[in-house]
């Protein structure tokens, strides 16, 4: 809920990653804000703030990163196009700006380490005989 976070103001100061609300929307700061010259209204400066869903949501809605400052990292979880995704690949600096389903994401419906196995064939022949029929 946005009500749990501080309302942004021109006097706000904080660190990269801090969350504020502005006009009912939550935003995560992309950089440290230590003086008035660095502090700009989140809804008007997407290069300095990333709009986010509530951080209490395990799979928040995916937002297109503008660059490395707000890129996703391996292990990040998102929802996109009605599916849940986990970031599985990133560039050498650990950043992923690709859309889920295009590159660097795996759907949570499939296990990341166990490839799908072919369905088992039904057993033929008598049980315990290894499929071999003998006559006496």
Image (cartoon, grey):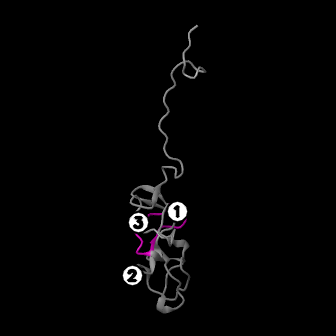
47 or 104, nearer to the observer? 104
Please check the rendered image and state whether residue 117 is part of the magenta-colored stretch, yes or no: no
Give the residue pinned by disc 1. 57
| Residue 44, numbered label | 2
Does 69 sit above or below residue 124? below
| Chief secondary structure of the magenta portion | loop
| Residue 98, numbered label | 3
The alpha-carbon separation of the residues under discs 3 and 1 comes to 21 Å
Residue in the picture at 50% in, 33% down: 120
Mark with earlier residue (2, 3): 2
Task: Give the label, 3 or 1, closer to the camera.
Answer: 3
Where does residue 126 sit, x and y in percent of width and height?
Answer: 56, 18
61 or 135, nearer to the observer? 135
Where does residue 75 sit, x and y in percent of width and height?
Answer: 53, 62
Where does residue 103 sit, x and y in percent of width and height?
Answer: 41, 61
Tell me the magenta residue range: 50-67
Residue in the picture at 40% in, 75% down: 66
């Amino acid at each position: 809920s946005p009500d749990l976070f501080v309302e942004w103001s021109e006097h706000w100061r904080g660190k990269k990653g801090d969350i504020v609300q502005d006009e009912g929307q939550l935003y995560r700061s992309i950089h440290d804000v230590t003086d008035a010259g660095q502090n700009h209204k989140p809804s008007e400066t997407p290069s300095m703030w990333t709009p986010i869903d509530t951080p209490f949501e395990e799979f928040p809605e995916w937002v297109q990163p503008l660059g490395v400052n707000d890129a996703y990292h391996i292990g990040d979880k998102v929802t996109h196009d009605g599916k849940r995704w986990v970031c599985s690949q990133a560039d050498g600096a650990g950043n992923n700006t690709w859309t889920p389903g295009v590159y660097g994401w795996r759907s949570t419906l499939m296990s990341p380490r166990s490839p799908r196995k072919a369905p088992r064939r039904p057993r033929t022949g008598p049980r315990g005989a290894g499929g071999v029929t003998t006559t006496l």
